[in-house]
Image: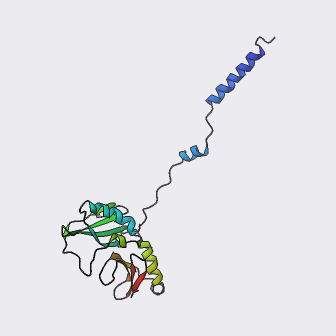
Amino acid sequence: MNIFPKQCLITAATAVVLLLSSCSPAPKTADSDSADKPAAPAGPPQPVTAKTAFWPMYMAARSWATDLVTLKVDSKDVGGVKNQDGKAALWEATFASPTQHAYRVYTYAIAAYPPDIYKGVTSGQTMDWGGPTSNVLPVQLSDFSTDSDAAYTAAAAEASAWLKKNPDKPLTGFALGNAAKFGAPVWVLTWGSDKSGYRAYVNATTGKVLSKK
């Protein structure tokens, strides 16, 4: 003879089910699975364009002199990192202050390269400056609209025939400057040496190749 009423049996069975379900681990979702996975290691720092490096240097230089002008921007080589396609691991900018009659060189590096190169912006010593000359004129920011990668693409296209014949001649110079003979700021790209190389001048405003040799 059953001493428990049928309703009591149903209630007891329901309680057991609820107890077991509360003790069971919650099913993992796709989000929880991805959260448990370790993050992928970051790759090595990549070279950047001139403008990417220029603005942090410019803002740092503004704290030195509010009347600063830009005289030059050029790329530098760093051991173990390949500069390519108009991008570099280290950029250097020269700023001058007309009221202080001085200039300072700032650098921007994508990473630290001991013992002399530090990551980010580094400022150099203040040096005497006699003012602009016909060969070194200030670069107006409004004229600096063509970034280094675009300048490289234009120059490399113009030099393609020469580069095919001289695959062993690396890019040895890449700088932005301004001189009276150009009438506007230019990117100057040099492959090889002055005696046995190729040089292209790219207008920093229009991105057009002005001349070559």
- Dividing the image into 4 quarters, which one contains the N terminus? top right
Residue 118 in sight in this render: no
* 151 in relation to 38, above or below: below
Task: Pinpoint residue 188: horizontal percent, then vertical percent.
Answer: 36, 79
The residue at the far front in this view is: 142
Is residue 22 positioned above or below 174 on the image?
Answer: above
Depth check, front residue: 100 or 33 = 100
**Residue 123 in the image: x percent, y percent?**
26, 63
Up/down of 176 relative to 194, above or below: above
**Extreme-right residue of the structure:** 1
* Residue 6 visible here: yes
Q: In the rendering, at what x and y percent does residue 27 appear? A: 63, 38
Against 137, residue 43 (above or below) is: above
Displayed quadrant of residue 4: top right
Q: Nearer the viewer, residue 213 or 169?
A: 213
| Colouring rule applied to residues | rainbow
Residue 105 lies left or right of residue 174; in this view the side is: left
Q: Nearer the viewer, residue 45 or 101?
A: 101
Q: Image quadrant for the C terminus?
A: bottom left
Left or right of residue 167: residue 142: left
Name the residue at 48% across, 55% down. 41
Where residue 53 sits in the image (x, y, percent)?
A: 36, 65
Q: How many marks?
A: 0
